Image: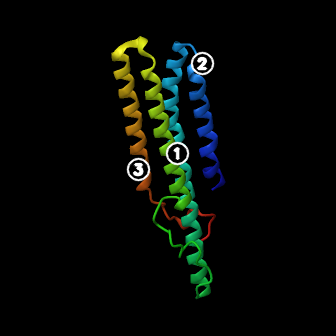
Amino acid sequence: MASLERRVPAAGAAIVAFLGVLPLMPESSQWILLVVIPASLMWFVRTTINHARSFEDVLRRIEWIERRANQLAGEDLLGFQSNHPSRGRAVGGRTGLETVGAVLLASALVLVTCLVLTTNMTNDGIVMGLVYYGYIVAIGTYLIACVHGWRRYQSKENPSGFGGIS
């Protein structure tokens, strides 16, 4: 969970730092960053989603252990995760939901910032602007598709795969 919560400020700060340096660079270098930064958002969102899915697997494992312990005891001894009010509402629980949402929002803001920065770079003409606009739309669409796929993720319960406990 800690890795999921730490990634937003760390990776976000690095991406924003590159955007802050952009106006100080020569135009050819600016274009390189304006291509690389949006592409890096795909990594940022995908790895965040992967951590949220892994966290979902941990939550489901805890739930399985609670149910199994209660079954063996013949009474309800444990129930934090198996009876949690937000159980099943979001992949990775509230932490996963908030982190993926924050990363998607930050990514959208970075994409918009990249578009705004290109409006000041008129030397390359309208065709380059349209190509770049298409590039940004494609990356934004891909990020939304990744989040949509994440929302449908379901942990595979396989007790034999959990340390041999069954």
**Residue 66 in picture, x, y percent from top left:** 59, 75
Question: With respect to residue 134, does 93 lie above or below?
Answer: below
Q: Element type at marker 1? A: helix
User: Residue at label 2?
Assistant: 24
Viewer-side residue, 104 vs 63:
104
| First of labels 1, 2 by sequence position | 2
Query: Which is in the foreground here, disc 3 or disc 1?
Result: 1
Disc assigned to residue 103: 1
**Residue 97 in picture, x, y percent from top left:** 50, 56
Rendered residue at 56%/22% (across/down): 22
Q: CA distance from mark 3 to mark 2?
A: 38 Å
| First of labels 3, 1 by sequence position | 1
**Residue 73 lies in quadrant:** bottom right
Which residue type does callout 2 highlight? Leu
Rendered residue at 60%/18% (across/down): 24
User: Residue at label 3?
Assistant: 149
Disc assigned to residue 95: none
Viewer-side residue, 104 vs 72:
104
Rendered residue at 49%/39% (across/down): 107
Residue found at the far top of this picture: 123
Which residue type does callout 1 highlight? Val
Q: Are marks 1 and 2 in contact (CB under 8 Å)?
A: no
